[in-house]
Image: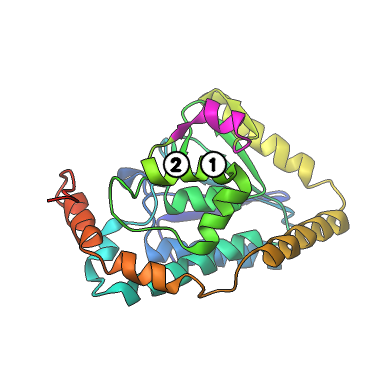
């Protein structure tokens, strides 16, 4: 794998990807996103791997994209390019021909939330949290595709709630809303996830491939074409709010959006 901050391992029929940047709550660099795509390619090319687990080290799943990478954004077009690139990563996870499990311990935020929501199952610890808090932090927005993924999983009303308020949902609310498939004590999560993955690896691959392909076609049928929200992304990423949000985050202060 091309990133030292992502660990790839194969345990029998189960592939495991671990985000390994705990000092930054596994905030994702582009090297890590690229390594995740490479892991998906490897998992699909390796015939013995029948299930892929994605998890984070050190009590966090992933804190989203490393904000320092936004420093170089000159205008709204950079935001459009960023969201296109992120969409390609998330889409690669969704289009994987084998089952995917997000093992979520701690925060799955921003891009980390999108990765977890793109997986087929989400096994969660009691300290799992999900959300996209950009309305109170960065002042940017989600792509059309990632907004649609949230609506598909949470429904329109809950998606509106989370994106407008910027709040995170805890493990119990995630379970009640169907985001978490199970909630377990921290010390039981890894073993339980492996157990489910091994069970899944015994299921008929033809049924799994057909089901995932069917769900993807249904998703694509309901989703607008790529680029249909570029004007919205360009305006948001080109805004003074986004510049202030990035500066405030890197300076470790509260953003002043209405100053």
x then y, percent, for residue 214: 79, 60
In this picture, residue 37 sits left or right of residue 23: right
Mark sitting on residue 162: 2
* Quarter holding residue 212: bottom right
Q: Tell me: residue 61, above or below residue 93.
A: above
Q: Tell me: residue 81, above or below residue 10.
A: below
Q: Nearer the N terminus, badge 1 or badge 2?
A: 1
Which residue occupies 72% across, 62% down?
Answer: 216
Q: Are marks 1 and 2 in contact (CB under 8 Å)?
A: no
Element assignment for label 2: helix
Residue 258: within the magenta?
A: no
Which residue occupies 86% across, 55% down?
Answer: 207
x then y, percent, for residue 144: 51, 63
Element assignment for label 1: helix
Q: Tell me: residue 38, above or below residue 188.
A: below
Region of the chain picked out in magenta, as a range = 169-179
Marks 1 and 2, Cα distance to the nearest angstrom? Answer: 9 Å
Mark sitting on residue 54: none
Q: Is residue 98 visible?
A: yes
On the image, numbered disc 1 is attached to which residue?
Answer: 157
């Amino acid at each position: 794998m091309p990133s030292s901050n992502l660990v790839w391992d194969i345990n029998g029929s189960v592939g495991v990807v671990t985000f390994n940047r705990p000092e930054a709550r596994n905030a994702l660099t582009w090297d890590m996103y690229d390594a995740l795509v490479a892991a998906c390619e490897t998992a699909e090319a390796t015939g013995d791997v029948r299930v892929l687990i994605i998890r984070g080290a050190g009590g966090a799943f992933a804190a989203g994209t490393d904000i320092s990478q936004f420093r170089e954004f000159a205008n709204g077009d950079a935001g459009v390019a960023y969201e296109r690139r992120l969409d390609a990563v998330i889409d690669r996870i969704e289009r994987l021909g084998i089952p995917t499990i997000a093992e979520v311990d701690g925060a799955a935020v921003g891009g980390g939330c999108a990765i977890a929501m793109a997986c087929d199952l989400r096994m969660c610890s009691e300290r799992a949290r999900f959300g996209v808090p950009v309305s109170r932090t960065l002042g940017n927005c989600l792509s059309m595709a990632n907004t649609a993924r949230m609506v598909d999983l949470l429904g329109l009303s809950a998606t509106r709630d989370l994106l407008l308020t910027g709040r995170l949902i805890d493990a119990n609310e995630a379970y009640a809303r169907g985001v978490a498939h199970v909630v377990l004590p921290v010390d039981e999560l890894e073993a339980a996830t492996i157990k489910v993955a091994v069970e899944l690896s015994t299921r008929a691959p033809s049924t799994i491939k057909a089901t995932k392909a069917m769900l993807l076609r249904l998703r694509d049928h309901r989703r607008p074409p790529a680029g249909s929200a570029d004007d919205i992304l360009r305006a948001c990423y080109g805004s003074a709010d986004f510049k202030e949000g990035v500066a405030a985050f890197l300076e470790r202060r509260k953003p002043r959006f209405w100053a």
